[in-house]
Image: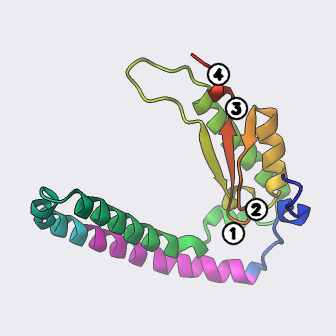
Amino acid sequence: MHGYESSATWTPEPTRPRWQLVLRFAATLVCFPVLCALWLAVAAVFFVVGLFADAIAAVSDGFERGYIRFMDDTLGGIARLGSWFVTWSELRYEGNIEYYRARVDRCVTHWTTLASAPREPKKSRPPVECAIPLRDYRGVGAGYVAEVALRQGWELRPSDVRKEVRLWWSAASRVD
């Protein structure tokens, strides 16, 4: 945490009312299949248009980069429409501090295992950065994520803790 940041942002999120979670979960059950169908339909349209745009892309590199950026932004925007969805575990464990502690511990341990794995020849390097989403630490706060991550060798990156906590594996700076 940096000195200019308010310590209030690193505390747990307030518990949401049960009725609101139930309502969001019911809406999630209805909207999730619709969102998936919409995403697949838009992806199919981009694929078909991409087949014809391949002729233009053969002549212009800028067109291909722009098309891919537009496609990523559009499909990512559709996926972000579901950011309000509530999962069964969120509905069931909202306010349970021990559940969220275990969830953060499991998530940070998973990333630590991936980052500390030895580099294999002719394979990509292990990840050195990760982001822990708010969904994983809502009940314990970003401060707990930072505490667990620092104990396991991670360093904090500039983060918007209302969305995610970004971490960097400090051992990655060593020379192999």
Q: Identify residue type, mark 1.
A: Leu
Is residue 165 shown left or right of residue 10?
Answer: left
Say which mark, if any, is on residue 174.
4
At 69% from the left and 41% from the top, the residue drawn is 108
Q: Quadrant of the C terminus?
A: top right
Q: Amino acid at mark 2?
A: Arg
The CA span between labels 4 and 3 is: 8 Å
Q: Position of residue 149 (x, y in %)?
A: 76, 40
Residues at discs 4 and 3 in contact (Cβ within 8 Å): no
Q: Which residue is mark 1?
A: 91
The alpha-carbon separation of the residues under discs 3 and 2 comes to 25 Å
Magenta range: 19-43
Alpha-carbon neighbours of circle 3 within 10 Å: few (<14), some, or many (≥20)?
Answer: some
> What is the crowding at mark 1: few (fewer than 14 residues within 10 Å), some, or many (at least 20)?
some
How many angstroms separate mark 1 from mark 3 (CA)? 35 Å
Name which of mark 1 and mark 4 comes first in the sequence. Answer: 1
* Residue for point 37% across, 21% down: 122
Q: Is residue 61 left or right of residue 12?
A: left
Residue 170 tag number: 3
Q: How many marks?
A: 4
**Tag 1–tag 4 contact (CB < 8 Å):** no
Judged from the image, the secondary structure of the residue bearing numbered disc 2 is loop
Q: Nearer the viewer, residue 50 or 63?
A: 63
User: Which amino acid type corresponds to the residue marked 4 in the rendered image?
Assistant: Arg
User: Helix, strand or loop at disc 3?
Assistant: helix
The mark closer to the camera, 1 or 2, is: 2
Disc nearest the viewer among 1 and 4? 4
| Residue 102 part of the magenta-drawn span | no
Q: Earlier in the sequence, mark 2 or mark 4?
A: 2
- Could you tell which of marks 1 and 2 lies nearer the N-terminus? 1
Which residue is tagged 2?
138
